[in-house]
Image (cartoon, helix red, strand yellow):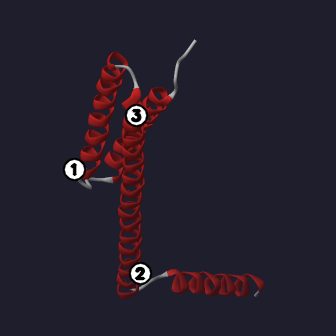
Amino acid sequence: MKRTLLLISSCAVMSAFVITSCNTPAKKVENAEEKVAEAKDDLKDANQEYLDDIQNYRRQTQEQVDANQIIINDFNERIKDEKKEAKKDYQEKIAKLEQKNSDMKRKMDEYKENGKDNWEKFKTEFSHDMSELGQAFKDLTVKNTK
């Protein structure tokens, strides 16, 4: 009797587990559709963040290019009273830096959005180049007199 009762209760418990764990095909489709919708939302959010990052970086770069141009203009004003030889040397250096500055602006303007990995690589290289250009501007404006 105890055995029969134990067997019947075991079967009932197992049946309850089987019934509650089974999903109908309609429920599985519904769950899959929800996951797809969530994935699309996540992708849309990630893509918007990527585009926002590009836009913010473009703005920051433009500000730096504009600041570099102000430095160039100020430096041109300062060297007006320099000796002819020194003035010529400064003007050549300024022309090179001005060209690099405009090249950097053009490079950023021509960048096309083609994937987050490519963006990160471009951004790293571009930041490095902008840092070097900024250092060149700083070096130019420092007078090396002994």
Q: Which residue is mark 1?
A: 110
Amino acid, disc 2: Asn
Q: Which residue is mark 3?
A: 133
The secondary structure type at the circle numbered 2 is: helix
x 28%, y 31%: residue? 95
Real-space CA distance between mark 1 and mark 3, rounded to the nearest whole angstrom: 19 Å
Where residue 23 sits, quadrant-wise, is bottom left
Which residue extends farthest top? 146
Please determine whether, in this image, residue 35 is positioned above or below residue 106: below
Is the C-beta separation of discs 2 and 3 under 8 Å? no
Where residue 30 sits, quadrant-wise, is bottom left
User: Which-is-in-front pick, marks 1 and 2?
Assistant: 1
User: Which-is-in-front pick, marks 2 and 3?
Assistant: 3
In terms of sequence position, does the residue under pointer 2 or pointer 3 come before the other? 2
x 37%, y 42%: residue? 73
Q: Which residue is mark 2?
A: 31
Please determine whether, in this image, residue 89 is positioned above or below residue 99: above
